Amino acid sequence: MKQSQLFVPTLKEAPKDAEVKSHKLMARAGLIKQTAAGIYTYLPLGLRVIKNIEAIIREEHDQRGCSELLMPALQPRDLWEESGRWGQYGPELMRLKDRKERDFCLGPTHEEVITAVVRDYIQSYKKLPLALYQIQTKFRDEMRPRFGLMRGREFIMKDLYTFSESRADLDAWYQTMKIAYTTIFNRCGLETKIVSSDTGQIGGDAADEFMVMSEVGEDTITYCDQCDYAANQEFSGLSEGDPCPNCEGTIQVAKGIEVGNIFKLGTKYSESMNAYFTDRSGHRQPVIMGCYGLGISRTLMAAVEQHSTDDSLLWPKAITPFHVHVIPVKMTPENEDAILSLYNNLSRTYTVLLDDRDERVGVKFKDADLIGLPYRVVLGKDFKDGLVEFTDRHTAETRLVAVTDLPDLLLL
Ligand code: ATP
Ligand code: MG
């Protein structure tokens, strides 16, 4: 892509309300733009990263036997009355009426809709298990939307729902998805800790959260310095220095960003919404459910928080908006053909951003630091002799190399 044609509105100053580094950078790098409190437009660069994260999620779900569908964001009150949550959910639920004064909400989560979608179909154990997921915009009228995409009122989530005939099968899905989530976050350049949590608004029997340890996290994690015990402080009630409930160790406390949350729902929704099946011995049973949420826009934010300094970003290769930034110091009628030919060649294998703008090189470098691509190729005075300045920003090493050697150096 030519940078002159890409909409990247970089800013010198971060918006005043941006409190944390990632929010400031995402606004300055032209990744997102606020439309209203807690509501954002994903600009082209930000959207490319979102799409990369989504592709990783799809791969890790599809290969484990989950199938993708897309449910409506607009949900009728009747379904929420069936589960009992219309009255319970509180002011976070965005409620609205249609022209006939019928009540609807904008989905903050989809247990009701998915249960209504499958309940007529899963009448026999032969139809189970079933694992269905979607990637969708969710709506929650958060009391304190803040930190950019961290706590939005409109945000992108992947939500998966599993339907099982037995507790053992639910346990197996739960285990599988723990591994899937850890893999997804690792591929996005994030290390996560799995912590036990409360089941909250969603309900059910057990829940675990995936936390990225970070000072800007809104959750407090209590974890053992010796065993793998870890729990959200809201759930454990422990403090720094307390004895570990599982071993001889001592409790430590740290902040975390919740990027995912998985729940063993059990039969909460199947009982209230009448999703029953006939089991192997001919008995009617409520189907056993699990749900698994992953915050995609929050994951993007966490990745920026972890992979940046105050003035520059450095994308993990798997989610970077482009692999290579090609920056001609100056484009002239004499060198233009050679530049375009290099750009076209690289574009066959890599995603390439060519800074063809008529800007001073200092401006180009400042923007390039903000945009944060992992590889940089600067076409300077030696370009006429077939040499370019190559930087692998992950190793911070810069050297003069032959154009023909670039394919050996650009490793994905
Ligand atoms: P929180 O405790 O942060 O309010 P939650 O526990 O209510 O989140 P879940 O219902 O578990 O959220 O949603 C699944 C995932 O969706 C969360 O782990 C998080 O990554 C993401 N998420 C939830 N609320 C928001 C939000 N307001 N903005 C962005 N992402 C969110
Ligand atoms: Mg949660």
Image (tube, helix red, strand yellow):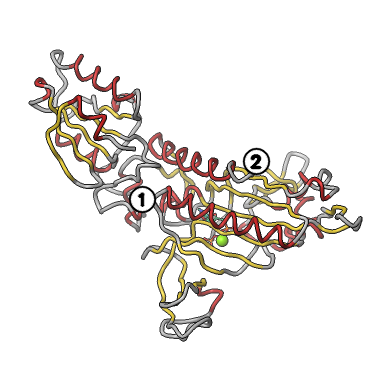
List the residue tagged with mark 2: 67
Instruction: Say which quadrant the N terminus sits in.
Output: top left
In whole angstroms, how far apart are the C-alphas of marks 2 and 1? 29 Å
The yes-or-no answer for disc 1 within 8 Å of ligand 1 is no
Relative to residue 298, is residue 115 drawn left or right? right
List the residue tagged with mark 1: 304
Image location of residue 103, percent across then percent down: 74, 48
Residue 344: give its label: none
Instruction: Say which quadrant the C terminus sits in.
Output: top left
- Seen in the picture, residue 36 relative to 146 is either above or below; the reply is above
Front residue of 24/50: it is 50
Image location of residue 393, percent across then percent down: 23, 44
Which structural element holds mark 2?
strand
Q: Earlier in the sequence, mark 2 or mark 1?
A: 2
What amino acid does circle 1 point to? Val
Quarter-of-image position of residue 408: top left
- Residue sitting at x 41%, y 68%: 255
Front residue of 312/55: it is 55
Split into quadrants, the picture shows ligand 2 in the one at: bottom right
Front residue of 123/171: it is 171
Relative to residue 123, is residue 150 drawn left or right? left
